[in-house]
Image (cartoon, rainbow, N blue to C red):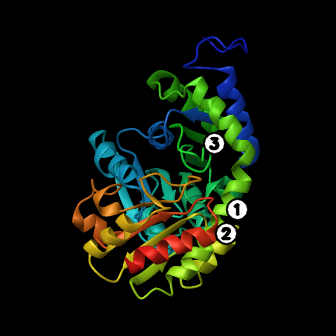
Amino acid sequence: FTDEVDHFLYSRFHNPTVAMFEKRLAAIEGAEFCVATGSGMSAMFASLACLVSAGDHVVASASMFSSCHVVITEFLPKWGVTYELVKGNDPKVWAKALSKSTKAVFIETPSNPLLDIVDIAMVSDLAHAVGATVIVDNIMASTILQKPLELGADVVMYSATKHIDGQGRVLAGAILGSFSYIHEHLLPFVRHTGPSISAFNAWILVKSLETMEMRVHRMSDNALAIAQYLETRPEIKSVRYPGLASHPEHALAMRQMKKGGSTIGIEFAGSVKDAYKVMNALRVIDISNNLGDSKSLITHPASTTHRRLSPEVQAEMGITPSVVRLSVGLEHVDDLIKDLDQAFKS
């Protein structure tokens, strides 16, 4: 318990199967160390909470997953931590938001659900100038398509439930960073607050890592083809996909990422009823809130994943009632396009 011997003594602290997963993911990511957790949100919370205390300041990208938004804007202020949200990639706006009291910067890129892109290198340079630690939520891109640490970030975190597992079987999270961050800040926090992952879930993830690269590339290729198809549909007002030239941050995305990822943000030209009608008519694509799965999944963020946010905050993120999120899986792309085609015609 004093870390004087390198033995597995207690599973909340150490476990050989968990350690195997952590070492393998760290090798793939190019990180010094990895700590696995029981869920993606426990990873997100721990990555921030281990750094901040009353009087500190956090800066975050404005577009993010609902639960991440709640942690930063509702829970951290209860403990005396202030925050500022920044939209876009204007260096002057980011520089103005940062101060010497800024302890951490949290950015989600691409964002969930509309795939906004944040310039990791630019934000990291500005944050480091004031001594802040940069944490990147890399869930939407995965370690296969984007390497935040190579771009200047200090910490990268994942919901391993998504692309890492890739088959909707387990809840898990992961936090990766330097020796000093992990051992001086993160480990003391997680060992005493207990967001530990089960050994069985870690074993599932060890096996999943063996196919992750193949899965992510296939899913991303499928997503690009489907995004291109969706741009031709009169029922669709806009398609948000980093791999499309129409994406406002396409050039930046292609500098940071190898491909556009497996998720597409879609806004219908009609009402929410039109969106629901198409979703309910799908036969191959399922309705579910997960993403990064081998199975293609579609969801309605305003009423599910981002329901916790006020209509005003949803609107600021671009999440209208007519927006849906499509996570593209491993099915043959022709089958997916045929499924969407028949749903539009229903």
Find residue 268 and report its horizontal and vertical position in percent.
Answer: 36, 78
* Residue at horizontal 48 percent and vertical 44 percent from the top: 44
| Closer to the eye: label 1 or 3 | 1
Circle 2 Cα neighbour tier, 10 Å, few/some/many (<14 / 14–19 / ≥20): many
Cα separation between marks 3 and 2? 27 Å
Q: Is residue 275 above or below residue 174?
A: below
Circle 1 Cα neighbour tier, 10 Å, few/some/many (<14 / 14–19 / ≥20): some
* Residue at horizontal 38 percent and vertical 62 percent from the top: 85
Cα separation between marks 2 and 1? 6 Å
Q: Which disc number belongs to residue 217?
A: 1
Query: Quick check: 265 left or right of 148?
Result: left
Cα separation between marks 1 and 3? 22 Å
Q: Which amino acid does label 3 sit on?
A: Leu
The earlier-in-sequence mark between 3 and 2 is 3
Q: Are dots 2 and 1 in contact, CB under 8 Å?
A: yes
Q: Which disc number belongs to residue 221?
A: 2
Query: Quick check: 332 left or right of 277?
Result: right
Find residue 311 and report its horizontal and vertical position in percent.
Answer: 23, 65
Q: Which disc number belongs to residue 176?
A: 3
Find residue 172 and report its horizontal and vertical position in percent.
Answer: 53, 37
- The answer to whether any part of residue 332 appears in the image is yes
User: Which quarter of the rendering shows the N terminus?
Assistant: top right
